[in-house]
Amino acid sequence: MGMQAGGGDHLQSEINVTPMVDIMLVLLIIFMVVTPFLQQGVTVAIPRDMKNPDEDQAINKETSVIISVTCAPNHPECRPEETEYYLGKKKVSLDALKEQVEKALANKKEEDKIVYIKSSVNVSYGEVVKVINAVREKGVDKIGLVADKKKKGATTAAPAT
Amino acid sequence: MGMSAGAGNRAVPYINVTPLIDVLLVLLIIFMVVTPLKPSRFKADIPTQRDPNEDVSQLKPNPLTLVVTIGTDLQIKLNQDQMGSVNQPENLAATLQKTFQQRKEQHAYKVGMETATNIPEDQRIEKTVFVKAPRALKYGDVVKVIDAIKGAGASPVGLQVDDLP
């Protein structure tokens, strides 16, 4: 760049990093602000490193119905009676869940009526089945079990479906 | 800024920003990695509510039905055959794949799909698999098995929700 900056007859040999730091800070703040909004529902320990789930961008849509099933962090062994249900970010009881799922699905097209279930791995399967039964009463027959896909290159590829 | 750089015997008021940039870059990369870019899910079908007055005994069982049962001891069974434990579902996946391959050779189509030649052959083969697991099991173990079933090419995967032990 051959930039001759500043004082006297000396060449300044240091790069001016201030604009770069500015940009970095802005990027950092953008990512920090955006990250919590990218995911719908509450944060739960969904199954990780699964080989074959299908990608579905609709999970991050604002309009998707996402039910989270999890236990409070102070109940690590997660007995059935300690399970908590969330619709979106709101904690609900199983009975309220039915009504609100129905409301949320009311003006959706038939083929879009899919409910995503984000369940923590340590929840007992019976609790998940309870939720499934609840949404089934509202005429839903398609559910999506949200899982985390293993990053590429870690294991041998499984055959495509 | 009124900064006079690198001159003579005066003190140089220059902050060393390199460590700051290092930390910022690392934080930036951490956030970029953590940001979930590609959400994914297992699609599963569940039975719709049945009319309670319907006579279930009149329904004919499909001989091609595949049911994967998980026991409370975490052992997997495909129909009646033992398939090993939940943590090693490779055997199950291999058996399912073999079954689907056989069905392709024998042209075992889904009910109602026998003559639908406009649909690709692969989608007409009966590849429905049902999953049955006791309520006491951990959700994580069930999903591991669903992952293996999905990997074998099964579609759709159905979850049994009634009469679970």
Image: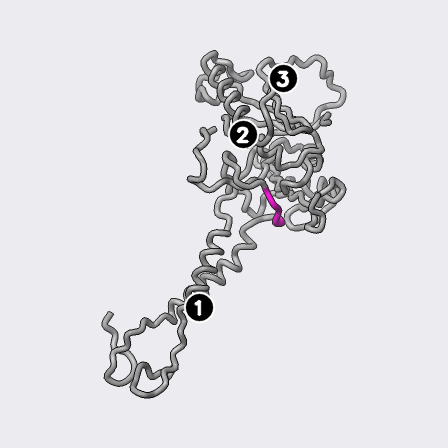
Q: Position of residue B43 (x, y in %)?
A: 56, 33
Q: Chain of mark 2?
A: B
Q: Position of residue B79 (x, y in %)?
A: 62, 18
Amino acid type shown at disc 3: Gln
Number of marks in picture? 3
Residue closest to the eye, A29 or B102: B102
Residue closest to the eye, A109 or A45: A45
Q: Residues within 10 Å of mark 2 (few under 14, many from 20)?
A: many
Q: Which mark is residue A75?
A: none
Identify the residue position indicated by label 1 in the image: B20
Q: Chain of mark 3?
A: B
Residue A143 picture quarter: top right
Amino acid type shown at disc 2: Ala
Identify the residue position indicated by label 2 in the image: B148
Q: Is residue A66 left or right of residue B110?
A: right
Q: Which residues are magenta?
A: A42-46
Sequence order check, earlier mark of 3 and 1: 1
Amino acid type shown at disc 1: Leu
* Disc 3 secondary structure class: loop
Sequence order check, earlier mark of 2 and 3: 3
Q: Is residue A28 left or right of residue B129?
A: left
- Marks 2 and 3 on same chain: yes
Q: Position of residue A52 (x, y in %)?
A: 50, 34
Is-magenta flag for residue A69?
Answer: no
